[in-house]
Image (cartoon, rainbow, N blue to C red):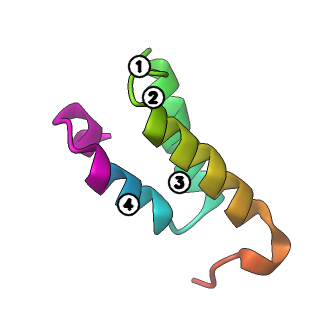
Amino acid sequence: MALLKVGNTAAAIAQIKVAPSVKDLKQLQNSITAAKVTGRWPDVDVAIIENLALLSAPRLHRSP
């Protein structure tokens, strides 16, 4: 969320792509919703949705 607040969406998307778990992405999504900035960064919203789908696939879970 800090990267988004300073306007560095490219770094935020890079962090989203290496998110360790679905839980982390859901927390970020909830933070964005709570801050009422959903839609402000459409590319970030898409990256969150896509990576949630990828991490939710059973064969693509990353090991700890």
Q: Position of residue 58 (x, y in %)?
A: 83, 73
Q: Secondary structure at mark 4?
A: helix
Mark 2 vs mark 3, foreground winner is 2
Mark 4 lies on residue:
15
- Which residue is located at x 54 percent, y 32 percent? 30
* Residue 16 counted in the magenta span: no
* Residue that badge 2 annotates: 32
Question: Mark 3 to mark 4: distance in Å?
Answer: 11 Å
Residue range in magenta is 1-11
Query: Which type of secondary structure does the marked residue at label 2 adopt?
Result: helix
Residue position for label 1: 37
Q: CA distance from mark 4 to mark 2?
A: 15 Å
Residue for point 24% across, 41% down: 2
Amino acid type at circle 3 is: Asp
Which label is found at residue 24? Answer: 3
Q: Earlier in the sequence, mark 4 or mark 2?
A: 4
Apparent side of residue 5 relative to residue 51 in the rendered image (left or right): left
Q: Which amino acid type is marked by label 4?
A: Gln
Residue 49 lies left or right of residue 24; in this view the side is right
The residue sitting at 61% across, 57% down in the picture is 51
Q: Give the CA separation, mark 1 to mark 2.
A: 6 Å
Q: Residue furthest left?
A: 6
Q: Please state which of residues 5 and 40 is positioned toward the viewer in this rendering.
A: 40
Tell me the quadrant of the picture where the C terminus can be found: bottom right
Q: Amino acid at mark 2?
A: Ile
